[in-house]
Amino acid sequence: INALFQAAFESLATLCSDPQWLGGRIGALAVLHTWTRTLEWHPHVHMLVPAGALAADGRTWLTPKRRRKPFLIPVRALAKHFRGRFLNLARRALPHVPLPQIPWGKRWVVFIKPAVREPQRVLQYLGRYVHRTALTDKAIVHCDDNTVSFTYRDSRDQQRKRMTLPAREFVRRFLQHVPPKGLHRVRAFGLLHPAHRTTLKRLQLLLTAARSTGTTEPAEAD
């Protein structure tokens, strides 16, 4: 899990530091998500990234270069960089565990969405993963000594469906998403890390002053 967090942010930070894209330091809030809608084990990280970077002078806020559509970094470059970094960290963390052989031609999926602007929307987004379990009580529609039935929304056709599992299998699926003691599911990186609190406060003041004079317009990430 630590390798997953580290690889995700380092891949973003490395590409964003490249002057071809932004050329500065970024920050991110990362949230661990381990389940699919049918409670299968599917660990991945969601990251909230401000749509810009802090330049080396510590005073200039850099936004994505204006192309046909503004974005932080290209998805394919990010996927390639993440793949290499994650596999390297995973092998170092688990030297005695054989990792699956993945053909180099197989593309890794990295998904980028537009930036969330309002603070309330950011809190709602985080709340879905921090204060919610893998399955809500209302999703369970039937249970007895042998089986448990629950409903879920199929991501392929967005239809509500019902799944029935043996009780033992249901408990196994559910418990694998209970984080072990001491594991932090939400982590801050880069400019948003507590170690950079002073830098972040200065940046907030600079952006507030710039917006009040109309000298800057935050770009939207895509």
Image (cartoon, rainbow, N blue to C red):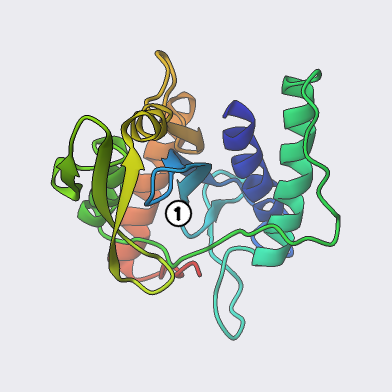
Side (left or right) of 101 relative to 173: right
Residue 102: x and y in percent read 81, 49
Residue pictured at 76% horizontal, 56% vertical = 80
Q: Which residue is mark 1?
A: 50
Residue pictured at 24% horizontal, 49% vertical = 150
Q: Is residue 114 above or below residue 89?
A: below
- Residue that lies at the very extreme toward the front in this rendered image: 146
Residue 178: x and y in percent read 37, 26
Q: Nearer the viewer, residue 73 or 152?
A: 152
Crowd around label 1: few <14 · some 14–19 · many ≥20 (10 Å) = many
- Residue that lies at the very extreme toward the top in this rendered image: 181
Q: Nearer the viewer, residue 195 or 107?
A: 107
How many numbered circles does the render carry? 1
Of the 4 image quadrants, the one containing the N terminus is top right
Asked whether the viewer can see residue 34, the reply is yes
Residue pictured at 71% horizontal, 39% vertical = 86
Q: Amino acid at mark 1?
A: Pro
